[in-house]
Image: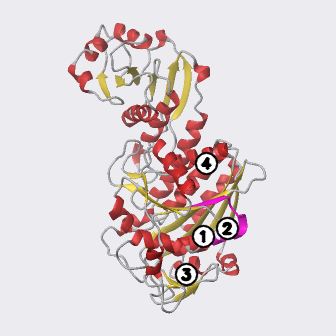
Amino acid sequence: MTALVQLSVTALDLDAIAARSGRVVVLVSPDGKLGQAARRINRLTKGALARFIESAAFETLKEGEAKELAYPTGMEAQAVQVVKLANQASSDLCRKAGAAIGGALGKEGALVLPGSVKRVEELALGLALKHYKFTDHKTGDEKSAAPEVTFAVSKPETVDFSTVTALAEGVFFTRDLVSEPSNVLTTTEFANRLVELESLGLKVEVFEEDRLEELGMNLLLSVGQGSVTPTKMVVMQWTGGGDKAPLALVGKGVVFDTGGISLKPAGGMEDMTMDMGGAGTVSGVMKSLALRKAPVNVVGLVGLVENMPDGKATRPGDVVTSMKGDTVEIINTDAEGRLVLADVLWYAQETFAPTAMIDLATLTGACLVALGNENAGVFSNDDAFCNGFLKAAEAEGEGAWRLPLGQGYDDLIKSDVADMKNVGPRWGGAITAAQFLKRFVKDETPWMHLDIAGVASVKSPTTLAPKGATGWGVLALNRMIDEMNKEG
């Protein structure tokens, strides 16, 4: 598993700056005014820092960006990284600045001198998230120990990295799960990694195929019929909120998706290792909640399955009965994620009577076509519930955009031989998928569906992540859960 940067805080010692090896990072406000630590660096480097700040190079830097002064005279450090950031900078800018530090961080670590910047924890979170590197399957010296980063501040007692660490650990857990190849992250291995979370205080239960059959979860089971990998459901409970009914988070965990009998084209099929992204996000949120001992009740449920073609695989035209009792005509076996979610959604409501329910899935290519890699698609039956999430996502810089639901779309999944079919026509595919899921949500349950097909894994680096798995949703859901708890 990917190790998090080791974060620590200490009292500012100006005399220790000269002897610090590795990297020294100094934050300078846009007006170029030097703080106490910056003045010491300027003196040690015989005015080099001041000359840089007075230059056009500093002037053209945007807030949150950085430049390096390599091998500075008068210091043991290999480099001084100068980050442009106002003392009262927003959380977004602080995270961006932290990402500039984390993206350049080497194995030698760094001493960070934030000066009078107020949001040091946000700076540290950006640093930690950007430094992520998935190297579990690299050989040689790729797997180096996590670097140590020390923040030297005038009042160390006012800085607490415990929440930063909990959130970053949750994001890293999600990224690691999404990054793993499918021959490693089988349904069994996925379940085992979730069972290990019991050490943090979560209650974890794994449902095997015989139990799923007893429950009548035939939609979920139908997806895995063609695979030798066993289908499972894992239920994780965090009960930090007393006797209150929980919020339910439901994740699609298709560890590999060939499309089944409706086989996908070969080009790009290797990316289907990330089709368990919804389950990965749910798992990361549950880990963060446990690590930070959140005073809330949340249950996370993930359906784990592999979709393969085989003589036993579900065929187009088959009719399957759900746990709810409704029948589904399978038109396309590559529309399997909604089958996984439907039974797990119904189980969550029947078992836990949640106050509200959110499902997450890399569900449709149609959502990626509509929104690209900038936003997840959001669907909901409850405006207030949905708006609460959208507000949280905006605050965390995680793109989300609400799309409509309606009877006209629901009519498109009517079947001639069953209660419904699992796909509609080509157009509005992300919406008809959401309408399918809505049929498994009770009228009294506030519900939201997050289609994360475009945001769970990306081809280019983002502000806080390298290319690949992003961990999208962990921060936004954590924030939303906190806000819901405050509102009672």
SS for dot 1: loop
Mark carried by residue 177? none
Residue at the spot of label 2 = 349
Q: CA distance from mark 3 to mark 4?
A: 33 Å
Is 350 included in the stretch rendered in magenta? Answer: yes
Q: In the picture, residue 99 is in which quadrant? A: top left
Question: Residues in magenta?
Answer: 346-359
SS for dot 2: helix
Q: CA distance from mark 1 to mark 4?
A: 20 Å
Residue at the spot of label 3 = 222
Q: CA distance from mark 3 to mark 1?
A: 20 Å
Foreground mark, 3 or 4, reads 4
At horizontal 48% and vertical 91% (from top left) the residue drawn is 416
Pointer 3 or 1: first along the chain: 3
How many other residues sit within 10 Å of disc 2, few (<14), some (14-19) or many (≥20)? some
Q: CA distance from mark 2 to mark 1?
A: 8 Å
Pointer 3 or 4: first along the chain: 3
Pointer 4 or 2: first along the chain: 2
